[in-house]
Each structure stands twice: as C-alpha cells, then as structure tokens.
Image (tube, rainbow, N blue to C red):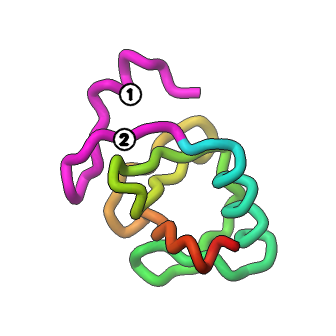
Amino acid sequence: MIDPDLLSFLVCPESRMPLAEADDETLAKLNAAVRAGGLKNQAGRKVESLLDGGLVCQDGVILYPIIDGIPILLIDEGIPLDPLRLL
C-alpha cells in the first residue's frame, strides 16, 4: 500500500493525470496474465515479474506496476489495461 500523502503527489508520467491504487481484481487478472506469459508493457516487452500492486491512471487506460514495494513510473513500463485482454 502506498502512503496516501505520497500518492497525492504521484501522477502519470505521460498524461500527468492523478494515479490511484489498483483494486485486487485487476491485480489478480494481471498476475494471471503474467503467469500465462501473455502480458506486455507499453514497450512491447513481456512482463516477467508478478505485481505487488499497481497505480492506475485516472482514465483507467494504463497501470504502472509496483514491484518489491517500488512504483515503476516509467512510460515504457506502463501496462495497458485493455478490458478485453484482461477477461
């Protein structure tokens, strides 16, 4: 869990929209996709590590992973949240 004071300062590095913590259902779907080997980030690279958490852009399009408690706020590391792909 990200400290609420810190979260209030974090924004999407691309759009500058506010970020919110991902819900458990979204994380479960993403981690299932990681295990299946089918999850790619914005750079097109396969996501290899299970996510501890994630920060979702206000528009719900991109999730920035939290790995080992550290938010990875790099544009290329963002994971597109295509709803059809996460079903």
Dominant secondary structure, magenta: loop
In the image, residue 84 lies at what x, y percent? 59, 78
Q: Residue at x 70, y 73 (%)?
A: 87
Q: Nearer the viewer, residue 10 or 48?
A: 10
Mark 2 crowdedness (10 Å alpha carbons): few <14, some 14-19, many ≥20:
many
In the rendered structure, does residue 71 fall within the stretch colored magenta?
Answer: no
Residue type indicated by callout 2: Leu
Mark 1 crowdedness (10 Å alpha carbons): few <14, some 14-19, many ≥20:
some
Residue type indicated by callout 1: Leu
Looking at the rendered structure, the secondary structure element under dot 1 is: helix
Q: Residue at x 40, y 63 (%)?
A: 61
Q: Counting residues from the N terminus, which is met first, the one under dot 1 or under dot 2? A: 1
In the image, residue 36 lies at what x, y percent? 79, 78
Task: Say which mark, if any, is on residue 7.
Answer: 1
Circle 1/circle 2 CB separation < 8 Å: yes
Looking at the rendered structure, the secondary structure element under dot 2 is: strand
Read off the magenta span.
Answer: 1-21
Which residue, as the protein is rendered here, is positioned at the far top? Answer: 5
Marks 1 and 2 sit apart, C-alpha to C-alpha, by 7 Å
Residue position marked by numbered label 2 in the rendering: 19
Q: Is residue 85 above or below residue 14?
A: below
On the image, which quarter does residue 75 sit in?
Answer: bottom left
